[in-house]
Image (tube, helix red, strand yellow):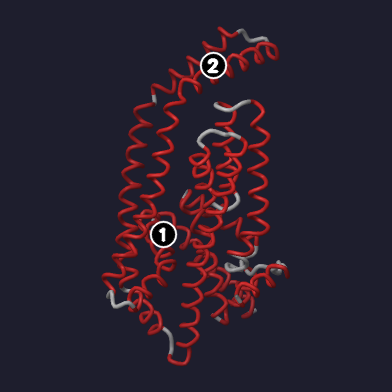
Amino acid sequence: MPLRNLSLRHTNQVLLLWVLSVVVLYFGRVFLIPLAFAAVLAMLLAPVASRLERWHLGRVGAALLCVVLLLAFVGGCIFIIGVQAANISEQLPQIQQKLQQLLAQAQQWIQQQFGVAPAQQIKFVQEQVSKLAQSANRYLTVSLKSFGGLLSGFVLVLLYLFFLIWGRAKIRKFFLQLAPNERRAEVGQMLNEITKVAGQYLSGRLLSMLFLAVIYCVGFSIIGLKNALLLSLIAVLPTLIPYVGAFVGAFFPLTMALVSGSSGQMLPVVGVLVAAQVIDNNIIEPLVMGSRLNLSPVFTIVAIVVGELLWGIPGMILFEPLLAVIRIVCAHVPALHPYAFLLEDEVAEPRWVQRLKQLVHRT
């Protein structure tokens, strides 16, 4: 009887902890999302800051330079996209003509299949447009608020990033002081693993995106798709979101191939997208990312779904490395070892990947 009561009380405590965690994550998302992004970026840039400090730049100077490097990277991406997007304006007459042809073909197909005359189709579309126009002001206000929130969130990320890089040594000492003396070495090892996993995950994701951008650009250029560089960048950006991002990114080049290209470009574009994803998933990601997160695929998908429910798109990006941090913490706490075992990846790394990594390390 006491054992049953103890088990029931433990179960209730665990459930209460999960409920409180979900409540805090959901209602505190305005504060937690910028902080989480800054923490992951700080782990990525920590080796850069350490190298700069060894060059006698100082903690403040190293932190400022890391923020400047991040701004230069983001600004460079925006500049390239802006320059390429300006070229599309020259093709607007061709795109409009192509859209009119597609619209006429769609109207003809609807009339043949459902017997709806083009005039009735146009009337229906006009009614829907008028309904959308009535709520345009509301959507515009929401969009402006979202844009303002995005700008303020980005500024907060930069501020948090600066202070996290500047005070990373003090933050590390704080966590070490929380642990008993006999366990400080293990806590230090846990902090090292967390820093390494989070930083390497983001760097591996960026390398994978760079590979996809190059393959997309080369492939689209070979098949003659216009604005290949712009479409490649737009198609790659959503791949920050695991699993879902590849399908979202594929929408843009396929749409452009349908609108501005010839009808024979659709299949080659699909071929380039599929070939790049197959190579990336089976060769590039195992090499640059491998089993760094060491997460079960099932719980990875669960993390993405829960992240979207709680934080939206930022949650889909952040909850996977966050779950990896939880796994590392569970692995270093004896009472939580079963949870670490449950979250671990049960799929072994391919031997050819291990051998290739050994060759890379030798060279």
Badge 2 density bin: few <14, some 14–19, many ≥20, Cα 10 Å: few
State which quarter of the image contains the C terminus: bottom right
Identity of the residue drawn at 68% across and 57% down: 282
Picture quadrant of residue 116: top right
The vertical placement of 99 against 287, above or below, is: above
* Residue type, label 1: Phe
The picture places residue 172, in percent across and down from the top left corner, at 38, 78
State which quarter of the image contains the N terminus: bottom right
The picture places residue 35, in percent across and down from the top left corner, at 37, 61
Which residue position is annotated with label 2?
Answer: 100
Q: Which of 169 and 265 is in front in this view?
A: 265
User: Label 2 vs label 1: CA separation?
Assistant: 43 Å
- Choose the circle earlier in sequence order: 2 or 1: 1
- The circle on residue 37 is 1
Badge 1 density bin: few <14, some 14–19, many ≥20, Cα 10 Å: many
The vertical placement of 4 against 124, above or below, is: below
Q: Nearer the viewer, residue 95 or 11?
A: 95
Q: Which of 222 and 315 is in front in this view?
A: 222
Picture quadrant of residue 105: top right
- The circle on residue 350 is none
Identity of the residue drawn at 40% across and 56% down: 33
The vertical placement of 95 against 47, above or below, is: above
Looking at the image, the residue that sits furthest to the right is: 351
Identity of the residue drawn at 47% across and 63% down: 21
The picture places residue 51, in percent across and down from the top left corner, at 38, 75
